[in-house]
């Protein structure tokens, strides 16, 4: 009888000792950001269920975003492999991840750009251009590359590339998605990882709500700090959108339409020759 009781106690200790799995997440002082997003969307730790309370803990964001992307909603498993269309234009997405042009096919390189549309527009402006690609999303500075006519896209790690023929047929307004997987990785819009921020602000503008409406405040000049000066209005708007929360709006001189992107536009002074363009974002960064 005593032996039976002893065996029962041992069994209870073994079962009870298992308990809930312990979360293995490392804090950010011990874990750096990943330069990869989970493709396909998945968790890379079997203990993510034990770590859910750390999904939105800023002290553990590096490890959680790398290892528990699906559990934390950073991404959602793709429902279809079919290439989707841009939401606000109905145009086919021309850019493909992991594609670019071979070195011998490069017509022009090291071209600075703000939006993907800048890169495709540059290609369309040059008759000899057969396509365009942009460099790795996590590397700064980022560049646009143009390919010679007749060149074919080829595998190029972490690039986005597209053919001129598609650009010709699908000229958007710069406020669209440029990646067919934006739906899957929409949770990355909220990532605090700088690499994922660069990816999403470049290719998922519509999904993340980085498109902006503008409220014009006439006769006012911002007293904030300028992020970038001497741009025309459309160039300044594109730049401000790409900067995300860092840019609150524009301060523009009316007579020559030159604008500065500002970190704040709520502190102003009266100036008859100036207008403020205050950015309204549907997405809260």
Image: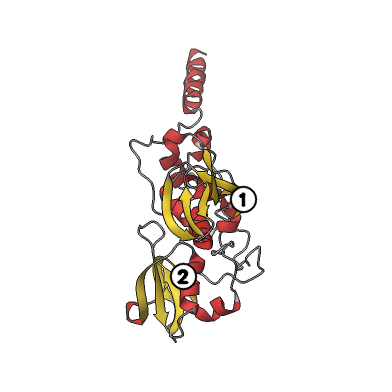
| Residue 121 in the image, given as x and y percentages of width and height | 50, 73
Res 200 seen here: no
Residue furthest to the front = 272
Of 18 and 9, the residue lying toward us: 18
Marks 1 and 2: which is nearer the front?
Answer: 1
Looking at the image, is 134 positioned above or below residue 73? below
Q: Which residue is mark 2?
A: 119
Q: Which residue is mark 1?
A: 216
| Residue 163 in the image, given as x and y percentages of width and height | 50, 78
Looking at the image, is 263 positioned above or below residue 86? above
Of 222 and 86, the residue lying toward us: 222
Looking at the image, is 243 positioned above or below residue 7? below
| Residue 184 in the image, given as x and y percentages of width and height | 57, 56
**Which of marks 2 and 1 precedes in the sequence?**
2
Looking at the image, is 114 positioned above or below residue 44? below
The answer to which quarter of the image holds residue 220 is top right
Which residue is at 50% across, 45% downward?
245
| Residue 169 in the image, given as x and y percentages of width and height | 60, 78
Q: Secondary structure at mark 2?
A: helix
Which residue is at 46% across, 70% downward?
119
Of 166 and 272, the residue lying toward us: 272
Disc assigned to residue 3 = none
**Screen quadrant of the C terminus:** top right
Res 168 seen here: yes
Q: Is residue 104 left or right of residue 46?
A: left
Of 2 and 68, the residue lying toward us: 68
Q: How far apart are the two marked residues, 1 and 2, measured between alpha carbons?
A: 28 Å
């Amino acid at each position: 009888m005593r032996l039976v009781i002893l065996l029962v106690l041992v069994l209870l200790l073994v079962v009870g000792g298992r308990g809930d799995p312990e979360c293995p997440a490392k804090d950010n002082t011990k874990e750096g950001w990943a330069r990869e997003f989970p493709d396909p969307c998945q968790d890379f730790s079997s203990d993510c269920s034990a770590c859910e309370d750390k999904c939105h803990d800023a002290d553990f964001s590096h490890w959680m975003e790398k290892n528990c992307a699906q559990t934390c909603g950073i991404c959602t498993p793709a429902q279809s492999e079919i290439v989707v269309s841009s939401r606000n234009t109905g145009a086919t997405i021309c850019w493909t991840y992991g594609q670019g042009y071979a070195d011998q096919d490069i017509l022009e390189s090291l071209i600075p750009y703000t939006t993907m549309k800048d890169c495709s527009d540059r290609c369309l402006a040059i008759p000899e251009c057969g396509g365009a690609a942009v460099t790795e999303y996590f590397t700064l500075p980022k560049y646009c590359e143009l390919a010679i006519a007749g060149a074919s896209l080829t595998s190029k790690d972490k690039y986005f590339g597209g053919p001129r023929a598609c650009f010709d047929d699908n000229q958007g307004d710069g406020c669209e998605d440029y990646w067919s997987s934006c739906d899957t990785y929409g949770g990355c819009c909220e990532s605090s990882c700088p690499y994922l921020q660069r990816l999403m602000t470049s290719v998922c503008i519509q999904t993340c709500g980085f498109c902006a409406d503008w409220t014009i405040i006439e006769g006012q000049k911002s007293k904030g700090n300028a992020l970038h000066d001497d741009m025309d209005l459309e160039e300044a708007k594109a730049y401000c959108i790409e900067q995300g929360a860092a840019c609150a709006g524009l301060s523009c001189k009316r007579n020559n339409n030159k604008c500065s992107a500002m970190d704040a536009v709520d502190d102003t002074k009266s100036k008859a020759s100036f207008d403020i363009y205050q950015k309204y974002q549907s997405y809260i960064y």
